[in-house]
Image (cartoon, helix red, strand yellow):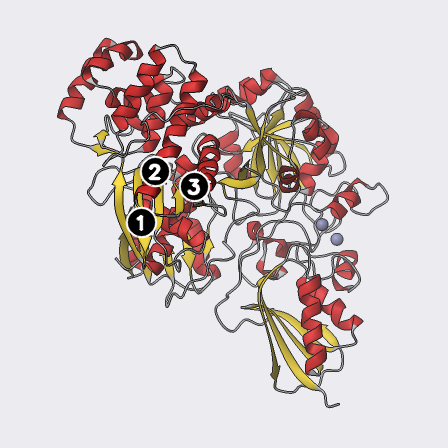
Amino acid sequence: MQTKTFKIQISGRVQGVGFRPFIYNLAVDNNLFGTVSNNENGVVIFINTNLKIASEFLKNILANKPEVSIINNSILEETKSVNYTDFKIIVSKTKNQIQIPLTPDFAVCKSCKKEIEDKNNRRYNYAFTTCVHCGPRYAVTKKYPFERKNTNLHKFKMCTTCLDEYENPTNKRFHSQTNSCKDCGITMELTTNTGKLISKNQETILDELVTFIQKGNIVAIKNTNGYLLCCDATNTKVINELRLRKNRFNKPFAVLFQNIEAIKNNFDVSEKELQTLQSVIAPIVILKNNKLQNFKSDVIAPNLNQTGVLLPSSALLHLIMQKFDKPLIATSGNMHGSPILSKKKEALENLNQIADYFLHHNLEINFPQDDAVVKFINKNPIWIRRSRGLAPNITNAITNLEQPILAMGAHLKSTFTFAPNNTIYTSQYFGNLNSFDVSNRFTQSIEKFTKIFNTKPKTILIDKHLQYHSSSVGKAYSKIWKTELIEIQHHKAHFCSVLAENNLFKQSKKILGVIWDGTGLGDDYKIWGGEFFTYQNAKIERINYFEYFNWLANDKMAKEPRLSLFSLLSNKDRKRIKNKFSNTEFKIYCKLSKSNTLKTASVGRLFDAVASLLDIIDVNTYDAEAPMLLENIAKKYNGNNPIDLLDNENYDKIPSQLIIKKVLELKQTKHSKKYLANTFIYTLATLIIREAKRNNIKIIACSGGVFQNSVLLDYLFQLASKNKMKLKINRKLPSNDENISFGQLMYYNNIKN
Ligand SMILES: [Zn+2]
Ligand SMILES: [Zn+2]
């Protein structure tokens, strides 16, 4: 039989995941000659063989691919004949623009953990142990393809032993780009908060650090995704001190555990939650408090009855936790409202009033990221923050864009989405763009992306709200790069994000979009946030919304739930809540509400009003505190007879004020807070179903921050299934403003009106 040459092109998450070594070994096992290399589309293989064997070889690849890889597509074709005499991994060739997912960071794997725990292993106690299956990727990437010279590991020259591993096809570190060891790798230093060196002894440095933690100090630890602020989670005094120094009084902290057993000892964890905690993403998972033993939740997550927990994401954190052997507070290393820090100088400058001691290391981080956050509702994940381990792309979104596009996203939970080609890259969460530093990080990252892909956008998409910092930056870029600039309405972007995630643009039946959040500028220049849309045939229509009420006192309204309540009560009923204000304040707001012209339909503010009405909270100390507390109280109600406050009536506009009036009436008849909170949320769920019925629609798509509420989602899923309706929500991105940039791009690509 005559031998021909076949080319196999594989695309997907195939770089930085041990793909080439896997192909090499498979080819050698099958006595095939040829080459494998990374290219701009993923991995490309050439082999001398016949069609039958080439097809079997491809089948074999698809069936046995490396654990952390994801294959999106594969093409097998005959190509120009070349006579190979062996099988080789060859240097990457990129001629065209890259078209691959950027590989995210992977949590330390089981086998690497074993090595660093084993006294007889040469990587014993080495905090930066990685292999082809684990370690930082996106965090240390400067350019693609994922080759050592394109990463920040480049400055560490592999010693001969490491190089042997790297070149040995049977070694687990064969072609592992992040390979290093004690002799050639990354080194740490322990300093005081003034930067004075305490230790550089790599053998003992982590023991010294742990002693400081045990003694009740706050330490800043540079992990492979940025600095973390840490202290003993069982020591109330030091946690309160951290709150004081960080100026963060009630916002929950995440807790890092040494192993899964320790988590099981403190929480009832479902199988899915266990899997997620131990996954390569290693996110913070929000678990219900029910059998806490090791720490007091009230100082960690006040009034919430839940705790965000995680396992060590890196060899460094694994070693520290082995030594500490107790739960540890692990929160992003930043000042209130600033981005997570990753440089020694910046960390010492910004965190010296918070941390007593610092553990630094000399691996540079290109893309610092917070830990991702997830919670489970009905056994399914809802992402609260999308960051390390997930960013920067969404694997299944495909577009037919003709030219590079940049979508700038929203303002408070900022992200950007860049589509240099047919692959879409949604950045990690950056935070509130009011902060100068967050905004700098945001623009620097955009510029790094234009370098990675060596292309500038031709179109820039911004929110309709021109006071969003992302919108003004987008405008400025548009001038510099001479691009087209397009404004997209906030809630329509939310709607498109959930339509795209669920592949609904091609759906012929009409879809109801329910988009509820805190704020967003509407087409009528009022503040939207309680919207009902329909989608059909590439057109979006606004069909209903919550009756407008006064938006008082600008930014204060979102921070002070008592103002939403004030605004939603009648003049007569307002007198009942006079005690929530000083006399002067009350007079000012009465006056303001007469002359006010700014109107809102925000459901987020309706939640605030109910939280204040039930005397749960009047002034927030952190973003979304009121709805979180309300959700927590509503969860405590186990009765099965919540009532619909609107008595199953259809309304032309959803009567916001009537809902509040009904809650007030029930409150006066001495119903419990938990019953009232639950009943309010149940009412919202029923009115969604009613709106769908009224319009004869069977598919409902919900997005916006309000849909992170587990009580609301629980009711909605129950009611939708009872009424034979399909309910779709954001599953890959958070439902909050983190999805706006992706939604803007999807709007641009799919909507025709
Ligand atoms: Zn590993
Ligand atoms: Zn080495």
Image position of 247 with respect to 452: above or below? above
| CA distance for labels 3 and 2 | 10 Å
Q: Amino acid at mark 1?
A: Thr
Q: Does residue 675 appear left or right of residue 128 in this picture?
A: left
Does dot 1 land on a helix, a strand or a loop?
strand
Q: Which residue is mark 2?
A: 690
Q: Which residue is mark 1?
A: 534
Does dot 3 land on a helix, a strand or a loop?
loop
Quarter the C terminus occupies: bottom left
Image position of 638 with respect to 597: above or below? above
Front-lying residue, 102 or 341:
102
Q: Is the residue under label 1 in contact with that under label 3 (CB below 8 Å)? A: no
Q: Which residue is mark 3?
A: 723
Chain-order first, disc 2 or disc 1? 1
Chain-order first, disc 3 or disc 2? 2
Q: Is residue 517 something that shows in the picture?
A: no
How packed mark 1 is, by other alpha carbons closer than 10 Å (few <14, some 14-19, many 20 or more), is many
Q: Cβ of disc 2 within 8 Å of ligand 1?
A: no
Q: Cβ of disc 1 within 8 Å of ligand 1?
A: no
Give coordinates of residue 584: x percent, y percent. Answer: 21, 11
Q: Amino acid at mark 3?
A: Asn
Q: Is the residue under label 1 in contact with that under label 2 (CB below 8 Å)? A: no
Q: Amino acid at mark 2?
A: Arg
Q: Residue at x 23, y 11 (%)?
A: 575
